[in-house]
Image (cartoon, coloured by chain):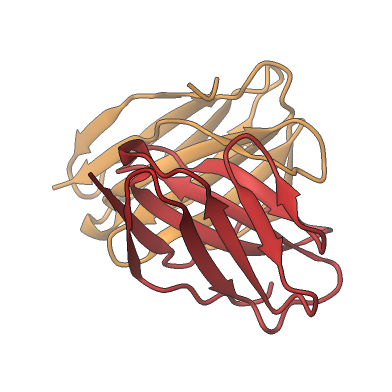
Amino acid sequence: DAKTTQPPSMDCAEGRAANLPCNHSTISGNEYVYWYRQIHSQGPQYIIHGLKNNETNEMASLIITEDRKSSTLILPHATLRDTAVYYCIVRARNTDKLIFGTGTRLQVFP
Amino acid sequence: DSGVTQTPKHLITATGQRVTLRCSPRSGDLSVYWYQQSLDQGLQFLIQYYNGEERAKGNILERFSAQQFPDLHSELNLSSLELGDSALYFCASSADLPAYEQYFGPGTRLTVT
């Protein structure tokens, strides 16, 4: 699985968009980009995933660059409840296991 | 609430002992995964079962074993416990393969003293 690089921490004001970057420059053609988050010590929660097109769901948007070497998770209107550690994971199509890195600790402030 | 249940919520035991952690997947999910989260190692994949059969193995110690039963619940057995085994143990489940989304349980916090 390709390695990912994320900033260790970020801040965001409540109500603003939170843009979390992820670098995955060694990603290969059969690997998806996944985002999970972990609020405090709860179980991780799936957010979104994509292969090469941008994706949007009720939680977030995922923007993947054309060369697929990086991506950005966008929380359009961050709330205090979005304070969590966000993990960007690259996963091959033929495997189910998730390899978690150190993630980005997002702090949303009032 | 993900629909995945784990018991017990907390477990405190002594070094050298053996414990069993239990996981019930979401209704209908055939795949179960175990992950360990410790302060120094982060979240690590341990093992995956699919419909009773082992499907993938990660960084699981030989002192640890798991199984998935016909009713699809799973148990993770940890033996000869060491202080370093203190961690949060998460179970996750997914419906089909490939598993686009894994649903994680609330975890079992194991403390070895």
Total number of numbered discs in the rendering: 0
The reply to whether residue A96 is in sight is: no
Q: Please give the name of the residue rendered at 42% of the width and 32% of the height, measured from the top-left corner.
A: B21
For the residue pair B1 and B50, the one nearer the viewer reads as B1
Q: Position of residue B106 (x, y in %)?
A: 40, 31
For the residue pair A22 and B98, the one nearer the viewer reads as A22
Residue B55 vs A43, above or below: the answer is: below
**Which residue sits furthest bottom?**
A26
In this structure image, what is the colour of chain B? orange
Q: Please give the name of the residue rendered at 13% of the width and 47% of the height, measured from the top-left corner.
A: B113
Residue B70 vs A101, above or below: the answer is: above
Q: Please give the name of the residue rendered at 43% of the width and 64% of the height, measured from the top-left corner.
A: A103
Task: Identify the image quadrant of residue B67.
Answer: top right
Q: Is residue B70 left or right of residue B35?
A: right
Task: Identify the image quadrant of residue B51.
Answer: top right
Q: Is residue A3 left or right of residue A54?
A: left
Q: Position of residue B100 (x, y in %)?
A: 74, 44
Task: Identify the image quadrant of residue A39.
Answer: top left
Q: Position of residue B27 (x, y in %)?
A: 67, 16
Residue B47 vs A25, above or below: the answer is: above
Q: Is residue B29 left or right of residue B84?
A: right
Chain depicted in red: A
Q: Position of residue B52 (x, y in %)?
A: 73, 32
For the residue pair A30 and B31, the one nearer the viewer reads as A30
**Which residue sits furthest left?**
B113
The reply to whether residue A109 is in sight is: yes
Q: Please give the name of the residue rendered at 19% of the width and 36% of the height, measured from the top-left corner.
A: B12
